[in-house]
Amino acid sequence: MSFYRKKHKKTYPPDINHVSVPGLVSGINMQSSLSRLYDIFVQTLETHPDVAQPDKSTVIDSSHFYAAAGDDLIRLVLSDSTVTVVDAAIADQIKACKFAKYEKLFTGAVYAACAAQMLNGGDFLSAIKLAEKAADFNWLDLFPQDTILEANHRLDPQRPGLDSIKAWLKTRFCMYPFNWVEINDNNKVFSCCATFLPTPLCTFDDVDRDGADAVLKSPALQKIRASILDGSFRYCSKMHCTAITNKWLISREEGLNLVKNLGPWPQHMMLAYDRSCNLSCPSCRRDMIVVSKYEQDRFKVISEKLVEPLLPHVDNIYVTGSGDPFGSIHFRTLLQKYCRDAVKKEPRLFLETNGVLCDKKAWDDIGLYGHVKDVLVSIDAATEATYKIVRRGGDFQRLLKNMRFLSELRRNGDIPHLLQRFVVQALNFREMADFVRMGLDFGVDSVEFNLIRNWGTFTTEEFAHNNIGSTEHPDHQEFINILRDPIFDYPIVNLSGMQNLRPVGTKIEQPTHSPGMAVTVSEVLLRLYAVFLHTVVEHPAVVANGNIKDSAVFCETTAGIIDTLLQIPDCETLMHTIQNDAPADIPPQHVGSFIGVVFAACASRAAARGKIHMAQKLTDEAIIRNPFDTFIQSTVAHIRQMTSQQAV
Ligand code: SF4
């Protein structure tokens, strides 16, 4: 019996009688089945602690409702209908029943239960269709997400199924619930991104009453941590969490060691409670959001009771996941105050912005120089025409000007990382490849793509029209074909959940003469060999007893040329090409050490771009060739540190 089946055979709560109606399938109409289901739903919702967020605004795991309802009753809803009829009928029938209080939540939960039933019955396409419908109503609900993952796996066994994901998670660890706090715009505080882990730690009312203790001593936090420690990750989204989908989680042993040394304070704080923004992008909101005086006062309380007590202790401060740091009076004031009074002098700020107000004047006014670690600019378009629609109220030319300003800050080392983000939807998916090219032009460290989600701003129909990730969308196949483009293999690209949508076997056919490379790999290696010879002669510290002792100088001098080599996105191809195309006339005694230092330089640059797996492989190969190279050893240590940071 698969994991999936075992999980949903459980019943909860124990005092609910399972509905068993043998032989009645054709005799009961859908509405009376729905009425009985509604009673069960309300009971599980109100009594089971894990079904919904405490204020019952959002369903987060309807599997408990499915378990309590039992297969028979769900089968009654499905009856003999085709999935298309069921799909159309459920919402209509529920509307007709007039379940005033929880109609929307209930509708989603019924779709989710029907999807699970379809999955168990082996109708995987219908399962996906109904689960996607469920997600339209309860988009944080983990249950239909699991169904989609499992159904996709059954249709294409090369895609990861729940059993294999769960088995892998048993060996992994995540630091988020141990050192992250996220203050959200829905008046709740989380220990991770709320989309990845929708169980809140506490509400703003709890903070108002108990201050920072509401977070630090939260019972939900203990429960979530226990789920990481027991390897179940039961509160985490296996579909949305990029640490899970990209397999970035650290090993269990490493995690257990790291948590031993943690103090009582989180190390990371995401401020995402003010939705104020200078734009009103349709994927995020319907209208421009300007917060009221009441909300401003509320933010002040949260700031005084939670943010400011945590500020001296946290290492990284993220502003903001909810609006724009430059478009929010509250965040601008907070940032100004922070930059003026910062106790820790090293850069600790991560700014997430639409970029339109992020210009030199803003940096001067707030005093940001020296305080910023990362800038992430959300753009969603590579052309002015599309930008006008997806970034309603934005000015493309002004954005490009500000990107040039940020690019210069990045080049000068004033900001260590610059990133671009693109929310993929029907309107813009054809511009994804150009967006990567735009990132290459601005010299960004990462181009991140996320599929559009319904944050409650779209009607179901509008969302269906925009959701290019849905198999139901008429342009979905074109989108899948676009994902085949080898440009998405570039090291700076992060496709997040869309990685799973790429046709299996998509791989760049990497010619020796790389696309976009002005010169051939052989020419690049020839230049590198010249630098190698020069470095060995000019810097005696590089070599000792015939061995490379410290290749740092070579790696620093060649960073620009090495970046050209890193246009080859696949690590195996890169290593193979370097070995094959090394100049033929290198004396045999130099070949191993030369290739070793090139690998070391590539590893160091790959690590700087966050390509940890690639960097690890390259250092493994580099150290075989130059085992005494202290630069490789320091790169290995740096990668380890990055791995643990990435895990948090
Ligand atoms: S595994 Fe993912 S969802 Fe779970 S805590 Fe870590 S980052 Fe969050």
Image: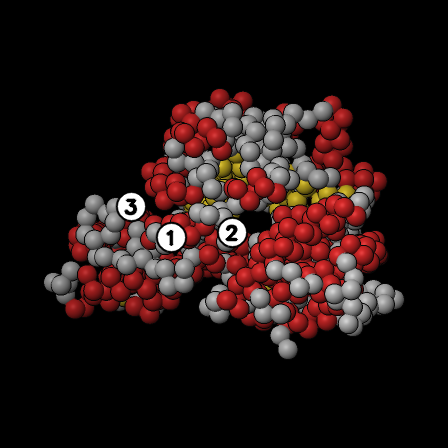
Residue at left 78%, top 68%? Answer: 24
Task: Mark 1: give few (<14), some (14-19) or many (20+) Cα within 10 Å.
Answer: few
CB of mark 1 within 8 Å of CB of mark 3?
no
The answer to whether the residue bearing label 3 lies less than 8 angstroms from the nearest atom of ligand 1 is: no
- Report the residue marked by disc 1: 481
* Label 1 – label 2 distance at C-alpha: 15 Å
Residue 311: x percent and y percent? 66, 39
Question: Quick check: can you spot residue 566?
Answer: no
Q: Is residue 380 above or below residue 227?
A: above
The residue tagged 3 is 560
Helix, strand or loop at mark 3: helix
- Residue located farthest toward the left when viewing the structure as drawn: 585
Label 1 or label 2, whichever lies nearer to me, is 2
282 vs 312, left or right, is left
* Residue that label 2 marks: 472
The answer to which quarter of the image holds residue 78 is: bottom right
Which corner quadrant of the image does residue 284 belong to? top right
- Ligand 1 closer than 8 Å to label 2 CB: no
Amino acid type assigned to the residue bearing label 2 in the image: Glu
Q: Position of residue 492 (x, y in %)?
A: 39, 48
